Image (cartoon, rainbow, N blue to C red):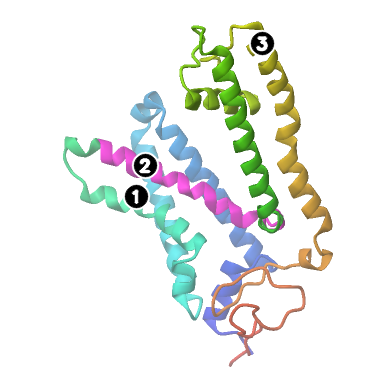
Amino acid sequence: MAKNWKAKLHEIIYEADTPAGKFFDVVLLILILASILLVMLESVEDFRLAHGEFLNISEWIITVLFTIEYFARIISIKKPTQYIFSFYGIIDLLSTIPKYLSLFIFGSQSLIALRALRLMRVFRILKLARFIGESNNILRALKASRIKIGVFIMFILILCTILGSVMYLVESGEDSGFTSIPRSIYWAIVTLTTVGYGDIAPLTALGQFIASIIMIMGYGIIAVPTGIVTAELATMDKDDIHLNTQSCPNCAAEGHRNGADFCFDCGESLNPKETD
């Protein structure tokens, strides 16, 4: 008994629990890293002038391989649109089409457009997300704590508005750059986040004292979102972490529990029957 060829292709491309699936993922990972390296090297003018032909041939090879991968993913599932319009499907398309589009742009006036097409290839770095399983746990923790983080950000915006207004009142008579309340709020945000561009600085003793307090507050405030997400990760149901790489052959949904027989999204069997 042998599995249908589409089922085999799906198992290799979408799942990493089998030897073939692991090998495919390793090869894909190497290609993604190589393509990112090529994009970076191409931005170095001296290297591009000296090795332009090598970069062009290498880019075409990787683009063709990514194209084959893209269509293989489409034909290996029963509902291709589920992949085509998914996050990864859009990223895969955006990271592949720039090289093909460049064939239809001619003339010296299109050089700027070609540069923009080259930049689109950086979307390939997002394909790396497939290989970071723990990122799913972090995303779930961020989603679960989004309300708390939203309230915290709102509090920071209110605090920066108040602090900016206070600094405008204190420093507006000096040549310190606090020329308006919005500009003062900008300074408060930059200072509270400990960025400190230095384009605006208080000159009065009172202004410098307030700025010192804001800087000290910034160190404590930056740690709050991290604490919220960390606490959410610690309280997550442990059962939710025991997920595998099995992908639904019908809708390509991922993140199924260990031992699951049916897709949590469409209800399709995760273990299609074998045929002769």
Left or right, 245 with respect to 6, comes to right
Q: Quadrant of the N terminus?
A: bottom right
Q: Which of the labelled discs sits on residue 162, or is there none?
A: none
Residue located at (27% from left, 41% from top):
113
Image quarter of residue 271 = bottom right
Q: Which of the labelled discs sits on residue 118, or is there none?
A: 2
- The answer to which of 174 and 68 lies nearer the viewer is 174
CB within 8 Å, label 1 to label 2: yes
Mark before the other along the chain sequence, 2 or 3: 2
Residue located at (71% from left, 55% from top):
141
How far apart are the alpha carbons under marks 1 and 2?
A: 7 Å
Q: How many marks?
A: 3
Across and down, in percent, residue 118 comes to 36, 42
Relative to 44, is 254 above or below?
A: below
Mark before the other along the chain sequence, 1 or 3: 1
What residue type is disc 2 on? Arg
Residue extent of the magenta highlight: 112-138
Q: Of helix, strand and loop, which one carries label 1? A: helix
- The answer to which of 9 and 209 lies nearer the viewer is 209
Left or right, 83 with respect to 210, comes to left
Q: Of helix, strand and loop, which one carries label 3? A: helix
Judging by the rendered image, the residue that carries numbered circle 3 is 206
Q: Residues within 10 Å of mark 3 (few under 14, many from 20)?
A: few
Mark before the other along the chain sequence, 1 or 2: 1
Q: Viewer-nearest of labels 2 and 3?
A: 3
